[in-house]
Image: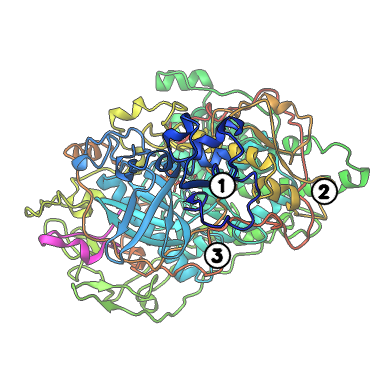
Amino acid sequence: MDDVVASEESKPQPAGLSADESLSPSSSSSSSSSRRPPSQFLFCAYSPSIDTNEKPQTLRVVVRRPVVARLTKDIVETYKLCNPQFHYSEELNPKRFLTSPSIGVLNDGYDNSNSDLILNVNFVLVNLETQRRYIVKDILGHGTFGQVAKCWVAETKSFVAVKIIKNQPAYYQQALVEVSILTTLNRKFDPEDKHHIVRIYDYFVHQRHLCIAFELLDTNLYELIKINHFRGLSLSIVQLFSKQILDGLSLMKDAGIIHCDLKPENILLCTSVKPAEIKIIDFGSACMEDRTVYSYIQSRYYRSPEVLLGYQYTTAIDMWSFGCIVAELFLGLPLFPGASEFDLLGRMIKILGGQPPDYVLKEAKNTSKFFKFVGTVNHGESISRQSAYQALTEEECEARELKKPSIGKEYFNHMNLEAIVTKYPYRKNLLEEDIVKESQIRLALIDFLRGLVEFDPAKRWSPLQASKHPFVTGEPFTCPYKPPLETPRMLVSQNVKVDHHPAGGHWFAAGLSPNVSSRTRVALHSSPHFQVVQYGYSGSYGSLGSHGSYNDGTGLGSSYGSYGDNSNMLASYYSPVGPSGMKGGMSILGSSPDARRRIIQLPPGNGLGVSPSAGNFAPMSLGTSPSQFTPPSSYSQVTAGSPGHYGPTSPARGSHGSPLGKVAAVSQFNRRKSWSEELLLQEDGSDVSCMATEFTKGLQLGQALVPPESSVCVRRSNRISSTSFSVSTQRPNGPIQAFSIGEVGSRHSGHDLHGGCAGPMSKPSHFMPHLPQSSPSRLGQQSVQRFNHGRSSTTVRGSEWNPVKVQPPPSNLNSGAPLSPGNSLFSNATGAPWGRRGNHPVANIPPTSRGRKDGRIA
Ligand SMILES: Nc1ncnc2c1ncn2[C@@H]1O[C@H](COP(=O)(O)OP(=O)(O)OP(=O)(O)O)[C@@H](O)[C@H]1O
């Protein structure tokens, strides 16, 4: 017994105990019990002698810890001391549920009505193949695809983030794509973890739920802006984050991957490295550039014009989103907070001037929702007055759609982009010369943004082009930037190791680009974004007839491989479920997003239900990503902010338009609370490191841009209880105070700033998610909106996804130990502090996070 010691009277008193700390009734025969403070009796073994003033003969109690600890942490020992008959049994403890609702109605009672695995604290997720155990400690977030839990891995003594996918085929299937894409990005394109993409560590199936283990990251950029009271971050921070995001986007472009959901919430701080970095997460909506399956993608505020209009899209849509994010980091407000798609487009036109080019409007399938045809199309010109298309007025839109379009508030006083940026208030007390300096950088920012939020996707800068802009490089900005012509991607010959898995089928062990050398690349467009290549396969694996392939109407293949219809050979997909999913004769197909093509196959009575994989879907449409599927009715019962319920994070936040979607972000409210509570504890005297202290000590960025006095600190605020702190990265007197920030919580604790680590990835296996009876019909109800975009059906890069194992994290990370207060997580090479900016020139209170319903809601 550590802290409360009952000992024989004859035993010597432990060294180091003061007289006050030891209670030895028998040692002072002269002292009567009446002279002892009453609290001391609490820790004596029960003895009638106390009541009867008789001297206890055999015991003395040594107390070494404060009474609060004894009455809480040591309560079991205390009870035992008082009553030796007392026995504690952990199994009898009530479970502390982390999932809501926590009533098991599906999957033999393991899942709630939303198909979420019901988690409680200390719930153990097990990778049966490696026997690695993930002990759930908390919920980090909640999204369209499921829950993200903070888990402890005893083996590595580290925390990781585990995304537990809903037990529904569509989510499961799309999550496989996430695994595949991220694995490839990590292993093939960024083996040294230098390009700001979240690391995937492991994946497995637990109770029919696909679980994906990621490195544990910190707060996201939306949260950062929020704790800054929605005032913009310093230009140096904007510049730093821009550079890092561009790095990630460059990598993705090289890999031919479109993120499809880039937004501040999906960019997380990674504070386990110094200086702090950002990482891009959530590849759950990602796709390959030549397999743009869904038309309803991107969160609304960050949605590109081409997606909105229903035009073909490329990696350029991520660059649009990136431009919106850069502007938001600077302004603290979304640039285009459209309350509807009509409103979104209207804001784009107003702020940017111009409109999408005619060649896009001519082809796009939604043009008539937003524009009327007024004349002959002017090829090559995108200037509004020369266009053959004219944007509809509100009234015209209402007449066409038979519904009044939602129009949000105006936040920027009808200013254009230049005015919004240049008139944004400067920090207080800036020296004249600093104002001049910053005004120059703002001009660079405007020019930078112009290249990103460019209506014409063919003219929009690529990540590489943008990364050379003076705003990013820090070079003096003297004149409008002329991006260098993008060097076409060169054919890279790679050695591809093909593992022939014992179960049959090809195991693309080398990661991406199987058979690269046999491809013929054909540039499709002069734009950097249209350097999509077509690949002609020569006898590559995964082709028709090979393992893992299937044709419509023919037999199914193995776990991995391609699928196709009669005329087209489509991509081979790597299915991480792999052969281990093929239990009991159940065929598991590769994770193709084109579920419509899949054949319904009933499992031969293996007790596992229908396979979640491709082969078991009824034909389904692809207009919307899985996040768009009709939510179970129970979802509507989830109320934001109610205890134990997940609330929407923010506008664009979440939902992707689906009510089921991001009921999003999760227990943000509760997490925010816990974070602020931890900060309160810090303020009460602890010197343990947390984001607040890290900010204060060393958000040291952009010396040249930010005066040294503009340090950052997170401080407690009495105004808002649940978000009871603020970051003084902004001008102190901004009018933006009216922003309601109390309703949405942060995910993360400042103490949890350790990345996780788990071992190598292994193939998920064992139990496949259960296919609910209702699933196929729901999936099948979507309207078909698949694009082919005129690309050759032989453009098959899908086969690039490979079942690579994920490398374990570097050993120096993620120890799980609290960071030292001295750590300057946010310091960069320049050692300059994070500056502050301030007031908004906005006319209105910006949208609250509640109001930003976002997403993909049309
Ligand atoms: N690696 C991580 N470390 C810490 N928190 C994370 C991590 N990954 C995700 N989260 C938290 O979980 C939330 C949901 O994660 P994610 O966006 O991947 O889920 P999703 O279901 O794909 O969401 P969406 O609805 O946007 O598609 C994130 O917003 C974030 O707060």
Q: Toward which corner of the image does residue 631 lie, by quadrant?
A: top left
Q: Which residues are magenta?
A: 568-594
Measured as percent of width and height from the top left, residue 171 is found at 31, 46
Q: Which residue is mark 3?
A: 813
**What is the tally of numbered marks visible in this picture?**
3
Foreground pick, 695 / 685: 685
Q: Secondary structure at mark 2?
A: helix
Mark with earlier residue (3, 2): 2
Q: Which residue is mark 2?
A: 440
**Labels 1 and 2 touching (C-beta < 8 A):** no
Q: Toward which corner of the image does residue 76 lie, by quadrant?
A: top left
Numbered label attached to residue 65? none
Q: Toward which corner of the image does residue 844 lie, by quadrant?
A: top right
Q: Is residue 585 magenta?
A: yes
Is residue 363 something one can see in this rendering?
A: no
Q: CA distance from mark 1 to mark 2?
A: 23 Å
- The image's colour scheme reads rainbow
Residue drawn 55% across the image and 30% down it:
849
Specify the amino acid type for callout 2.
Answer: Gln
Mark with earlier residue (1, 2): 1
Q: Is residue 480 magenta?
A: no
Foreground pick, 566 / 545: 545
Numbered label attached to residue 320? 1
Q: Secondary structure at mark 3?
A: loop
Q: Secondary structure at mark 1?
A: helix
